[in-house]
Amino acid sequence: MKQLKVGIFGFGTVGSGTIEILMTNSEIIEKQAGCPITIKKICVKNMGKKRSFDIDKSMLTDKTSDIIEDPEIDIVVEVMGGIEEARSIIESSFRKGKHVVSANKDLISLYGKELSDLAKENNCHFFYDAAVAGGIPILRSLQFALSGNKINKIGGIINGSTNYILTRMEVEKLSLEEIVEDAKALGFLEEDPSADLEGLDAARKCAILASIGFHSLVTSNQVYVSGINKITLEDIEYADSLGYKIKLLAVAENLDEGIVVRVHPALIEKEHPLASVLYEFNAVYVVGDKVGQTMFYGKGAGALPTGSSVVNDIISVSKNILFENKPELAYDFYENKEVLSLKNLSFSYYMRLLFEHDNNSVSNIIKSLEFYNIPIYSINQWQKEIDGKQYDEFVIITNSCRELNLERAVEEIDMLPNVSLPTRVIRIERGL
Ligand SMILES: NC(=O)c1ccc[n+]([C@@H]2O[C@H](COP(=O)([O-])OP(=O)(O)OC[C@H]3O[C@@H](n4cnc5c(N)ncnc54)[C@H](OP(=O)(O)O)[C@@H]3O)[C@@H](O)[C@H]2O)c1
């Protein structure tokens, strides 16, 4: 019976989950794949590092060539992260006729098309389901399970770290800074959490989701992105009192005139299913023209959930090898749609404004909003005393209006003489 051999780059979080599943579920995996799958080599950076579990030391190497140049290795698993080195390893693997499984969203969201073209040229399979929403099989579902649909919209919570922070702020009534420090100490956040907090991680995943769902290339630098770093406990509490929760959402829309891809904090109604996605969980909504709404829910990161997706990809590659199938590449586009700016789109907004007390503030605000055609749904006003001084805080909910108009109105409001803080604006998501 044929045996397939795997070479793995990376023995960190995802690598250890993948290795553990390949070793402990080997019987199930063999039955599913149709042949035994064994790990031949694991390439790491630091050979002396203590690993999360024992493996035969002869399997470890720090030489890339021990995998790339080994003719017995059929499948390369890249779970080391980073861009340039990972790219070069994947390219060399394809040139040697090796099939590749990766979890690398940073790389795929930028170079997925080039890598897929090279895979095709070399008749190699290339899967990366773990790159988006870890354990949730969302890319596979878009590529295979929903392929008879025109996908109109994909959206949801695809960054577990920021969802964890927002949930704890809401539940424990602590500031973002306090939760971030605690989450770092607990190992839930990296020492430099900027890619999560600034929304960049979600933007990379959003680009991959849009590309595969809409069959048109979107790269991560085309995604509008704004993170959660400016969200305060006050925003969470005001939103709560008005019937909303704040979530970092990634939304991709497939419109006739082009594609919209955006990642930003948003207010969503408490009754919306996404509002009850808590802590590190992810959920992705997909709206297809025939299937209607579907929602995928689960863990978006972690050793075993992400390893589960990697192993599933390894099994798919193995079956394809055994059946001598041609590569089916998710980044194989038949559409070439423009990515649209948000400026001409319309949203409803939450605005929070702080003014030194002055009886004219409210009329000045309303004047600016009316001038720019911003329809007001509600205005709430609170009196606040800060360091012995009187302030008025306003929370305004608008009806749908053009983004560009809102930006202009906010610029004008922020020039008013008694403004104490730049106006805080958060979109309200109504279309998901
Ligand atoms: N963590 C998650 O839950 C998650 C979820 C979805 C996708 N991903 C993606 O999966 C990938 C891996 O993430 P991770 O969290 O597992 O990272 P990690 O814990 O930092 O592990 C990285 C591993 O790669 C090895 N490595 C780094 N540079 C190398 C090089 N030049 N040559 C050989 N090995 C090298 C490291 O070796 P040493 O151990 O010797 O340092 C380490 O074992 C990333 O692309 C990430 O975006 C992660």
Image (tube, helix red, strand yellow):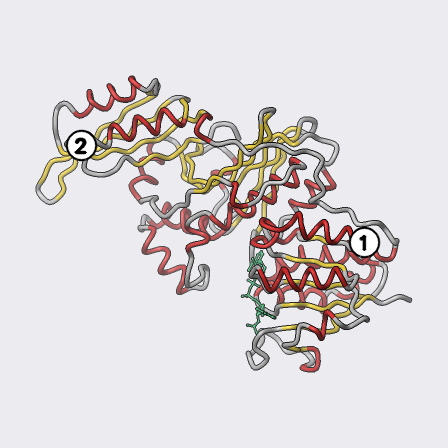
Front residue of 403 and 248: 403
The residue under label 1 is 123
Mark 2 or mark 1, which is nearer the start of the sequence? 1
Neighbourhood count class around disc 2 (C-alpha, 10 Å): few under 14, some 14–19, many 20 upward: many
Relative placement, left or right, of 89 versus 13 is right
On the image, the x and y values in percent for residue 158 come to: 53, 46
Q: Name the amino acid type tagged 1.
A: Asn
- Nearer mark to the viewer, of 1 and 2: 1
Residue drawn 80% across and 58% down? 318
Residue 64 in the image, given as x and y percentages of width and height: 67, 72
Q: Gap in Å between the C-alphas at discs 1 and 2?
A: 66 Å
Q: Position of residue 173 (x, y in %)?
A: 32, 48
Relative to 381, does residue 105 appear above or below in the rendering? below
Q: Where in the image, quadrant-wise, is ligand 1 located?
A: bottom right
The mark total stands at 2
Element assignment for label 2? strand
Left or right of 395 in this view: 383: left
Q: Give the quarter of the figure containing the N terminus.
A: bottom right
Q: Is residue 377 above or below residue 194?
A: above
Look at the picture and state if 186 lies above or below 420. Answer: below
Farthest-out residue, left: 388
Give percent across and percent down for residue 13.
57, 65
Q: Secondary structure at mark 1?
A: loop
- Mark number, residue 399: none
According to the picture, the residue beneath numbered tag 2 turns out to be: 392
Classify residue 333 by image quadrant.
top right
Near mark 1 (Cα within 10 A), the count class, few <14, some 14-19 or many ≥20, is: some
Name which quarter of the figure residue 18 lies in. Answer: bottom right
What is the residue that sits farthest to the right in this orientation? 1
